[in-house]
Amino acid sequence: MFRDGRGATTTGILLVITAVAFEGMGVGTAMPDIMADVGTLETYAWPFVAFLASSVLATVLGGRWADERGPAGPLVAGVAAFAIGLIAAGTATALPQLLVGRALQGLGAGALTVAVFVLVALAYPVQLRPAVFGWTATAWVLPSLLGPPAAAYVTETWSWHWVFLGIVPFAAIALVMMSRALRRLGSTRPERAGVRPGGRWLLLAAPLAAIGVAALSWAGERPGLTVLPVAVVALAVLIPSVRQLVPTGTLLARRGVASTVLSRGFLAGSFFAMNSFLPLMLNRLHGWTLTEAGAVLIVGSLGWSAASTWQGGRPDLRRDSLLRAAFGLIAVAIAIVIPVTLGLVPAWLTFAAQAIAGFGMGLGMPAVSLLVMGHSARGEVGFNTAAAQILDGLGTALLIGIGGALTAMLGLRSGLVSLFLALVATVLVGTLVAPRTGLFEPVPDAGGAGAGAGARANSDGAASPDAPASS
């Protein structure tokens, strides 16, 4: 990864991901002080909603841009928008400027994240990609461990403004580090893959999906029956919009890239929904402090990093098998959490549950990324990666919203047990879908860049013609 002229590109990718991760992990910690200065309790969720809605929009449009013109444009624009957004938020003295800054950060993060995936597909050979995703997962671990305490220290010692402004240099350095690879790829357009799903309706479906995901997340943060109409309208907007933004057959778990994209929603949604309610359960039902409950999530991050590193050194493993194992591990973790919630076993078992779940995510998330690339022709990586990220956010928002509604209707303990049982059912469905993600092995072509180009062979060695990834 750091040889043959790839060192600067690899370092730049890791830096830009670290910058986005620190921003994501640190802002939540500093937000109480931020909103005490420029907002109110009633507007507390607005900065998060602004980021989420704009990131969904940029993910879709950035993926199409990267497919049509290559990753250089959306990556440069994404880093620039992210940096400008950091400056705008860091210098904000009123809520409108803060919201503009957060929206720009979301636009930048959405565009640059999907562009990084296209860059990896073009700049790294197939055998190095597991290692790349192992390192990128590790780049999230340090911010998850240090981001919240660092943001708290900066906020208390200097000002919350530096939580934003302090990240700007990292984004700028990352862009400089990747500039050589971007110049080399700038004139190389990915091969066109024909008509993609959502082509005519993309400009309408993307903003509608952004609004729908934002509204669903807003409703999930306000558990109770009063927000039920908002959730219903959000789903009514989301379902037809998302159908235009994902490969054909995704909602039916069609074999190939469709099932792979769907698996991302099941995997991320179940894990992050569980994590969202674990601190609440430990604090309210077992009397743990928030610091003690937060330590459980750190164990999950470490397990994620360990598994990502392990799979990164084993490029020959079947990624659909790793994905199936990931669902199994998360099911085991949630099954441990259920008796903890009921008070039947000691609460410290949540540390073991989080280690198991984190290890599952460290296997599953890189596997999904590699499978998406493998199923995609060179002009489809951006579209399919954006689709996977949209279902990631949608699955998480939907399951968290369900958890909020259940706890509001049934009470904390009964609601949480009901949610965790629903999450077990979700990962079991994912286990059934995972075998449908199996990747045909590509026959090497002269260009060496397209994971989905040329004829492919099934796992039993039988040849089959290459089909468009959206079919």
Image: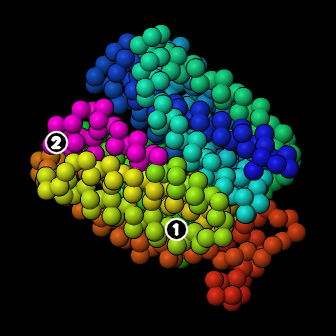
Q: Is residue 345 left or right of residue 220?
A: left
Query: Does residue 105 appear in this view?
Result: yes
Q: Amino acid at mark 1?
A: Leu
Q: Secondary structure at mark 2?
A: helix
Tell me if residue 74 is in the magenta stretch. Answer: no
Q: Is residue 291 magenta?
A: yes
At x 73%, y 44%, the residue is 10
Q: Is residue 379 left or right of residue 30?
A: right
Of the image marks 1 and 2, the number of the one nearer the N terminus: 2
Q: Quadrant of residue 170?
A: top right
- For image coordinates 45% across by 64% down, the residue present is 326
Residue under numbered circle 1: 322
Which residue corresponds to mark 2?
286
Q: Answer few, some or many: residues within 10 Å of disc 2's Cα (few below 14, many 20 plus, some between 14 and 19).
A: some
The residue sitting at 21% across, 36% down in the picture is 288
Q: Determine whether 43 is above or below 251 in the image.
A: above
Q: Position of residue 238 (x, y in %)?
A: 41, 54
Picture layout, residue 463 above or below residue 8:
below
User: Residue 433: image x %, image y %?
Assistant: 45, 73
Q: Is residue 196 visible?
A: no
Asked which quadrant contains residue 248, the reply is bottom right
**Looking at the figure, which quarter contains the C terminus?**
bottom right
The amino acid beneath tag 2 is: His
CA neighbours of label 1 inside 10 A, class few (<14), some (14 to 19), many (20+)? many
Residue span colored magenta: 278-302
Secondary structure state at the residue bearing disc 1: helix
Q: Nearer the viewer, residue 151 or 442?
A: 151
Residue 151 placement, left or right of 275: right
Helix, strand or loop for the magenta stretch, by majority: helix
47 or 359: nearer the viewer: 359
Q: Nearer the viewer, residue 228 or 279?
A: 279
